[in-house]
């Protein structure tokens, strides 16, 4: 179970200790995260909520190795990533993290199949093995029949499902979803959340998600509320909708 | 190559831009090819000049004659192996625009002096026996559709009358770029027909030296031999003579260098800008590539490879067109006799294109390499 008091077990899948992140902007120092602690167990589905500028996306970037903290450490599956070199961090991301972005960020000149195949190009898998993995991932997201379509030929929800297939195709340790439904209508958002929940419950994936939407956050096992760079509240499942942060 | 489809998809993302960029390279390399052909046309003779040959002209000017009597004196100078001579005829075949060089030659020594020009033995023997015979270069014979045995009338210019020749042979050069446009006839026939004031005089001499390393020494000895005479000489190696001839037209090399530099610099600005725009448009995509695990180095090579591929394809098209358009040979009717694109231009041209490709791609590639995923995605 997720803990934010810094006393999580050393066997936690993801462990953050004393995470600090400061930016310099126009001569002013902005303290985005302040001594944040977090422990996430394998198979958990955690959502982060909070007002704009509270540090949700920054936290996700630090946990995903896209950014480095000003202070503190992040350990994932035993690897302390905060002191890795840029190139080691890149290789680590390829093995351990699947990213899902709000704007899908598919490459428009590649088909759905080719977009999903991208992370596998970095592996030693043969073409036939890559094909098998890609088709499996597209089957999981229900888009096997659209694999040769380009992003412009897909709806927003379908594009996001392709992005999820890309995120899971290399079977990463955990998924980071930054506002995965932020650009979708309610129905498409529900479909995407069904899919993410299926990945957690059916495939045992660990998912960390940032969202502004309480309806979406309710789907997570636990929602953590950030304010001014600190974790200030926790809610379980549907308690989010009832304003039940403790 | 598992990344090929990724590169192909990116290249063909904006087809019009791709075509225009490749066309920029193609046009620049077409011009590069033409400039190389023109440079070759002017200075090819310099490269092909015999290392063991000297050219002796009248010290005042090449249009002033030298006495035939100098030949035997030259043969006595140590280091001189052979001597032959030429007279410029300068006649007109049917129309003044049908220009080609006509020379009265020393039949006895021509072949030893210029072994690069090949005439079949039977044709040469017919020529030697035929006082009004002539030998034409293969290019000139082809140009006018001449066959062996044809009668060729040439109207004298500074010499009076119409001179009738019989084509006894056609010579071919055994090196690419050698001049195949000359027209030779017997000096004896020339000597017989010229007015008295020209008799016993020749236009210029060629000397073959025993040892090319002694060329400068022999040249000096020849000039010393005839110093303070009525017909002082000026002797140069054939290479220096050819180079001096080219210089009469101005500094062709410099002109070509300037034009070439301007063309490639402009190309660099155009393609550099294009590459920068192409990379800027793909900021988010490059960030995603990095997020999913593509390394900084991969992104650098990926962007550079794109630039190099465009440069290579454009360059190859341009050089191919230049070769194709110069296959017809001299378009000036004889002024640029050595008119072809040498093979050596291809690696130089492609090298220049790739250098521009690297130069135009390197800054966008470095900026793509340095791109931080977090910053790039925040911008989108």
Image (spheres, rainbow, N blue to C red):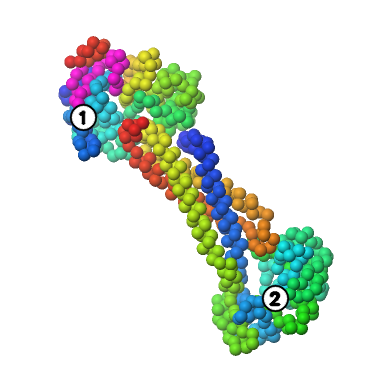
- Mark 1 vs mark 2: tell me if same chain: no
| Point 37% across, 25% down: residue | A103
User: Real-space Cα distance between discs 1 and 2?
Assistant: 93 Å
Q: Quadrant of residue B36?
A: bottom right
- SS for tag 1? strand
Q: Is residue A15 visible?
A: no
Nearer-the-camera pick, B302 or B281: B281
In the image, is residue A157 part of the stretch drawn in magenta?
Answer: no
Estimate the x, y position of residue A126 in percent, counting from the top left: 46, 31
Estimate the x, y position of residue B124 in percent, counting from the top left: 77, 70
Left or right relative to B278: residue B96 = right
Nearer-the-camera pick, A116 or B313: B313
Q: Quadrant of residue A228?
A: top left
Q: Is residue A93 shown above or below B352?
A: above
| Point 67% across, 80% down: residue | B65
Nearer-the-camera pick, B38 or B75: B38
- SS for tag 2? strand
Looking at the rendered image, the quarter that the C terminus of chain A falls into is top left
Left or right relative to B340: residue B186 = right
Left or right relative to B290: residue A10 = left
Badge 2 local density, few (<14 within 10 Å), some, or many (20+)? many
Chain assignment, label 1: A
Residue numbers of the magenta segment: A208-234
In the image, is residue A227 part of the stretch drawn in magenta?
Answer: yes
Badge 1 local density, few (<14 within 10 Å), some, or many (20+)? many
| Point 34% across, 38% down: residue | B371
Chain assignment, label 2: B
Disc 1 target residue: A33
Disc 2 target residue: B86
Estimate the x, y position of residue B18 in percent, counting from the top left: 51, 39
Q: Which mark, by number, is residue B151?
A: none
Q: Is residue A179 visible?
A: yes
């Amino acid at each position: 179970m997720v803990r934010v008091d810094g006393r999580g077990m050393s066997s936690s899948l993801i462990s953050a200790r004393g995470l600090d992140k400061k930016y310099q902007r126009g001569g002013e120092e902005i303290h985005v995260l302040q001594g944040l602690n977090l422990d996430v167990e394998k198979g958990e589905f955690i959502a982060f909520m909070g007002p704009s500028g509270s540090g949700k996306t920054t936290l996700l970037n630090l946990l995903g190795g896209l950014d480095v903290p000003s202070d503190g450490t992040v350990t994932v599956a035993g690897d302390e990533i905060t002191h890795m070199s840029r190139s080691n961090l890149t290789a680590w991301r390829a093995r351990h993290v699947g990213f899902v972005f709000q704007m899908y960020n598919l490459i428009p000149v590649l088909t759905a199949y080719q977009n999903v195949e991208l992370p596998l190009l970095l592996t030693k898998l043969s073409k036939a093995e890559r094909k098998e993995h890609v088709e499996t991932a597209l089957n999981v997201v229900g888009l096997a029949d659209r694999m040769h379509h380009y992003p412009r030929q897909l709806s927003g929800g379908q594009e996001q499902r392709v992005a999820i297939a890309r995120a899971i195709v290399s079977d990463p340790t955990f998924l980071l979803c930054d506002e995965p439904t932020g650009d979708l209508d309610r129905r498409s958002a529900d479909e995407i959340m069904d899919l993410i929940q299926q990945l957690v419950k059916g495939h045992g994936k660990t998912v960390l998600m940032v969202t502004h939407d309480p309806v979406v956050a309710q789907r997570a096992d636990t929602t953590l509320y950030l304010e001014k760079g600190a974790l200030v509240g926790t809610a379980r499942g549907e308690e989010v909708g009832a304003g039940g942060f403790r | 190559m598992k990344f090929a489809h990724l590169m192909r998809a990116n290249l063909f993302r904006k087809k019009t831009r791709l075509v225009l960029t490749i066309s920029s390279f193609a046009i620049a390399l077409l011009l590069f090819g033409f400039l190389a052909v023109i440079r070759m046309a002017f200075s090819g003779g310099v490269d092909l000049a015999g290392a063991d040959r000297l050219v002796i002209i009248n010290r005042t000017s090449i249009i002033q004659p030298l006495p035939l009597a100098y030949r035997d004196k030259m043969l006595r100078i140590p280091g001189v192996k052979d001597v032959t001579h030429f007279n410029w005829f300068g006649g007109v075949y049917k129309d003044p625009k049908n220009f080609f060089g006509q020379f009265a030659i020393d039949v006895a020594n021509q072949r030893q002096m210029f072994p690069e020009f090949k005439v079949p033995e039977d044709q040469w023997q017919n020529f030697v026996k035929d006082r009004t015979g002539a030998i034409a270069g293969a290019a000139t014979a082809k140009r006018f559709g001449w066959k062996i045995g044809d009668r060729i009338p040439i109207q004298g210019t500074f010499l009076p009358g119409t001179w009738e020749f019989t084509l006894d042979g056609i010579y071919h050069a055994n090196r690419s770029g050698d001049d195949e446009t000359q027209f030779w006839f017997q000096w004896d026939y020339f000597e017989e027909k010229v007015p008295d004031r020209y008799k016993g005089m020749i236009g210029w001499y060629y000397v073959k030296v025993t040892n090319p390393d002694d060329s400068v020494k022999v040249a000096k000895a020849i000039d010393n031999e005839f110093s303070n005479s009525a017909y002082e000489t000026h002797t140069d190696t054939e290479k220096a003579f050819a180079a001096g001839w080219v210089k009469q037209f101005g500094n062709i090399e410099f002109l070509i260098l300037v034009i070439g530099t301007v063309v490639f610099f402009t190309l660099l600005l155009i393609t550099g800008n294009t590459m920068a725009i192409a990379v800027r448009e793909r900021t988010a995509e490059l960030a995603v590539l990095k997020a999913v695990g593509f390394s900084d180095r991969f992104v650098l090579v990926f962007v550079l490879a794109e630039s190099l591929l465009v440069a290579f394809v454009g360059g190859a098209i341009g050089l191919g067109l230049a070769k194709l358009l110069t296959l017809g040979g001299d378009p000036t009717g004889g002024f640029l006799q050595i008119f072809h694109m040498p093979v050596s231009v291809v690696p130089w041209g492609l090298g220049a294109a790739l250098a521009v490709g690297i130069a135009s791609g390197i800054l966008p590639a470095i900026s793509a390499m340095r791109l931080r995923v977090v910053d790039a995605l925040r911008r989108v």
